[in-house]
Image (cartoon, rainbow, N blue to C red):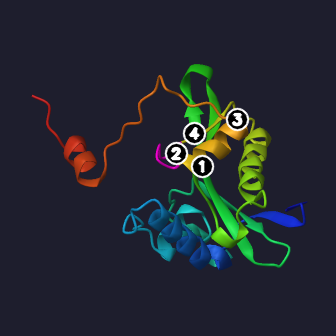
Amino acid sequence: MAIIHNAIIRPASRKDVSLLLAMMQATAAEQNVPNAVTATEADLINALGLEQVHSDDLENQTVGAHNGKALLVEAPEGEVAGMAFYFTTYVAWAAKSGICLEDLYVLPKYRCRGYARLLVQGVAKKAEELGCLRMEWLCYKQNHRALRFYRSIGAKEMDALASLRLDGDEMADFANETIS
């Protein structure tokens, strides 16, 4: 837990899951894709590794994908003001880990207080703690406010790279395609 500018940066806990989901929905709405969030509270609990494990139940636990982590910023008033999701990546050519900032959101009433900067800095500190080589993230090109902010902290746009992905059905179709 870090206290900066009277704000507190801390890891998300199980009690924060409903708030995290609400902020994810708010950021999707701001990006004009209000129905894009399909995660549930149970999905977040699993992805962030926040299950409550009882010692007598350890033997029967299944291994989930717990690569996701979240940091929160609490305003001096005590309310959670924003969040940052991140996960570890792998930099093959250097044989080192990296961190990807997956989602960043600050509630509108708390913007322009430096909280986004504190959250990104918190993720950068986690990357350093883990010995990561780099930190990277994606940003919608039409999100001019975010792009200005990212440039102001020294982030470089990687024009030489194209962002590509396979989603849902396309990924499943490709995965199950037979090669002849």
How many badges with numbers are in the image? 4
* Cα separation between marks 2 and 1: 7 Å
Do the residues under discs 1 and 4 have CB atoms within 8 angstroms? Answer: no
**Mark 3 vs 4, N-terminal side:** 4
**Label 1: how many Cα within 10 Å (few below 14, some 14–19, many 20+):** some
- Residue on which disc 3 sits: 132
Quadrant the C terminus occupies: top left
Q: What secondary structure is the stretch in magenta mostly built from?
A: loop
* Cα separation between marks 3 and 4: 9 Å
Q: Residue at x 31, y 44 (%)?
A: 166
Q: Position of residue 16 (x, y in %)?
A: 65, 75
Q: From this view, report whether residue 36 is shown above or below residue 57.
A: above
Q: Residue at x 44, y 68 (%)?
A: 39
Q: Secondary structure at mark 1?
A: helix
- Residue on which disc 1 sits: 146
**Label 4: how many Cα within 10 Å (few below 14, some 14–19, many 20+):** some
Which amino acid is tagged 2? Cys
Q: Position of residue 97 (x, y in %)?
A: 64, 34
Which amino acid is tagged 4? Thr
- Residue on which disc 2 sits: 139
Which amino acid is tagged 1? Ala
- Residue on which disc 4 sits: 89
